[in-house]
């Protein structure tokens, strides 16, 4: 049975995490646009409140809008990113956020589950809002990482706080441990309308050929081999689009890696410069970089279906550190139905976004599950994303059989 008290506690915990992110942000950083692809962190705070008010107070309770200005300013389709620096004050946004949540909790106290309203029947709208806020938490952390890197890069030359790592210190990695999965159909996605988002539904049968997949995500140690062996300068490892992007952007290493004049490899994060942690998963690489590394390793990126089948089988070491790029374009599943509105997923079914799976160190609990689908343009490097490779096995092709669906439940 769904509990209104449990929903309230989850929302309070999520909001507390959100507000802690702003504890050390000054007013200049609160309203600054750190990158053309991102809004100021303060805009995300107002957007969270407007979204919560719209779905609960306006759509479920039937209350009128509290502020036409806020509704417009904090709605992505109504306000272009460059204009979002003209924020209300932090105090005003925090007051608005608190008043919205107070009203939401008052409404929640008088709501019994299951409720007749289509958005409340399985508490789906509350779970969607929890995940919405947690996803914005991760975006805020991406922006804060960009701002921190900008500050550290301004302190040239970079000086590590600890003994530095030299390229000569890196030995060639051993063959990465891989696990094998047999060919056959499996049930992909979910039919749980209470906790999943529309693009994860419905559950459906997918046929997958036999394949091998890395047990662990690719480490900094392994990716450094790609860097020091000239992987960024060799077009043979890159797709045509990836090579064009790399050369135009002059990309030579992952986003937050730095090399000193004496060859020291470091990583910048927070307010520190530290030696590259060799055993951690490589992070902040684009799909293009992930794809090039996989070719360099004589492997490939897994399909989204392969990744989920391996995750369901319990064969993946889930490090909880990085999202993992797949080779799949973000498309709807067969039988997809937009819910609660088309704007969450439908605009991104455009053959322009690649699917990521898993979750990063910044991914919060309501988002972390085997069926959750993340998506970004292939050139994006700011997302906390890494690489897990796969490769084909000698095989006979298999085909999906819808009659197997009942047997697989």
Image: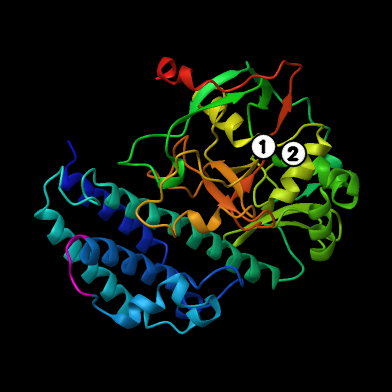
Quadrant placement of the C terminus:
top left
**Residue 85 position within the rendered picture, expressed as x and y whole percent measured from the top left:** 49, 81
- Viewport quadrant of the N terminus: top left
In which image quadrant can residue 273 be found?
bottom right
Point 83% across, 52% down: residue: 240
Local crowd size for mark 1, using a 10 Å CA cut-off: few (<14), some (14–19), many (≥20)? few
Q: Which residue is mark 2?
A: 221
User: Which residue is located at x 44 percent, y 18 percent?
Assistant: 408
Q: Position of residue 232 (x, y in %)?
A: 85, 51
Q: Secondary structure at mark 2?
A: helix
Left or right of 59? Residue 279 is right
- Residue at left 50%, top 73%? 40
Q: Who is closer to the viewer here, 294 or 253?
A: 294
> Is residue 35 visible in this depiction of the protein?
yes
Q: Secondary structure at mark 1?
A: loop
Query: Does residue 32 appear left or right of residue 252 in this picture?
Result: left
**Mark pair 2, 1: CA separation:** 6 Å
Q: Is residue 322 visible in this depiction of the protein? A: no
Task: Write down the region rendered in magenta.
Answer: 60-64
Observer-nearest of 44 and 239: 239
Residue 188 counted in the magenta span: no
How packed mark 2 is, by other alpha carbons closer than 10 Å (few <14, some 14-19, many 20 or more), is: some
Q: Which residue is mark 1?
A: 279
Name the main secondary structure of what is drawn in magenta.
loop
Q: Residue 284 placed where, x, y %?
A: 65, 52
Quadrant of residue 298 in the image? top right
- Sequence-wise, the earlier of marks 2 and 1 is 2
Does residue 358 sit above or below 26 in this rendering? above
Q: Which mark is residue 235?
A: none
State left or right for residue 390 relative to residue 227: left
Coloring applied to the structure: rainbow
Say whether marks 2 and 1 touch (CB < 8 Å).
Answer: yes
């Amino acid at each position: 049975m769904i509990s209104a008290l449990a929903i309230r506690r989850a929302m309070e915990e999520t909001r507390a995490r959100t507000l802690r992110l702003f504890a050390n942000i000054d007013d200049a950083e609160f309203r600054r646009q750190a990158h053309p692809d991102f809004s100021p962190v303060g805009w995300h705070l107002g957007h969270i409140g407007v979204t919560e008010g719209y779905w609960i107070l306006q759509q479920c309770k039937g209350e009128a809008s509290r502020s036409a200005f806020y509704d417009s300013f904090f709605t992505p389709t109504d306000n272009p990113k460059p204009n979002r620096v003209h924020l209300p004050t932090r105090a005003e946004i925090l007051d608005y956020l608190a008043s919205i949540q107070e009203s939401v909790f008052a409404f929640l106290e008088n709501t019994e589950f299951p409720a007749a309203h289509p958005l409340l029947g399985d508490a789906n709208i509350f779970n969607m809002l929890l995940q919405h806020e947690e996803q914005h938490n991760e975006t805020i952390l991406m922006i804060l990482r960009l701002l921190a890197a900008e500050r550290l890069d301004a302190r040239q030359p970079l000086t590590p706080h600890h003994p530095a790592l030299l390229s000569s210190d890196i030995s060639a990695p051993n063959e990465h441990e891989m696990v094998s999965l047999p060919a056959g159909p499996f049930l992909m996605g979910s039919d749980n309308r209470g906790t999943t988002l529309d693009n994860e539904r419905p559950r459906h049968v997918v046929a997958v050929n036999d394949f091998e997949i890395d047990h662990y995500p690719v480490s900094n140690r392994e990716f450094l081999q790609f860097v020091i062996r000239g992987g960024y300068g060799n077009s043979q490892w890159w797709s045509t689009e990836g090579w064009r992007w790399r050369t135009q952007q002059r990309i030579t290493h992952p986003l937050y890696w730095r090399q000193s004049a004496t060859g020291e490899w470091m990583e910048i994060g927070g307010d520190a410069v530290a030696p590259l942690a060799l055993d951690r998963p490589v992070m902040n690489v684009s799909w293009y970089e992930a794809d090039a590394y996989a070719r360099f390793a004589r492997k490939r990126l897994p399909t989204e279906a392969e990744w989920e089948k391996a995750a369901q089988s319990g064969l993946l070491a889930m490090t909880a550190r990085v999202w993992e790029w797949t080779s799949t374009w973000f498309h709807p599943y067969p039988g997809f139905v937009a819910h609660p509105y088309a704007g969450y997923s439908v605009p991104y079914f455009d053959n322009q976004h690649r699917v990521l799976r898993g979750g990063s160190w910044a991914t919060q609990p309501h988002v972390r599950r085997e069926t959750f689908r993340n998506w970004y343009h292939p050139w994006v490097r700011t997302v906390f994303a890494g690489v897990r490779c796969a490769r084909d096995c000698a095989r006979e092709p298999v085909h999906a059989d819808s009659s197997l669906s009942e047997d697989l439940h």
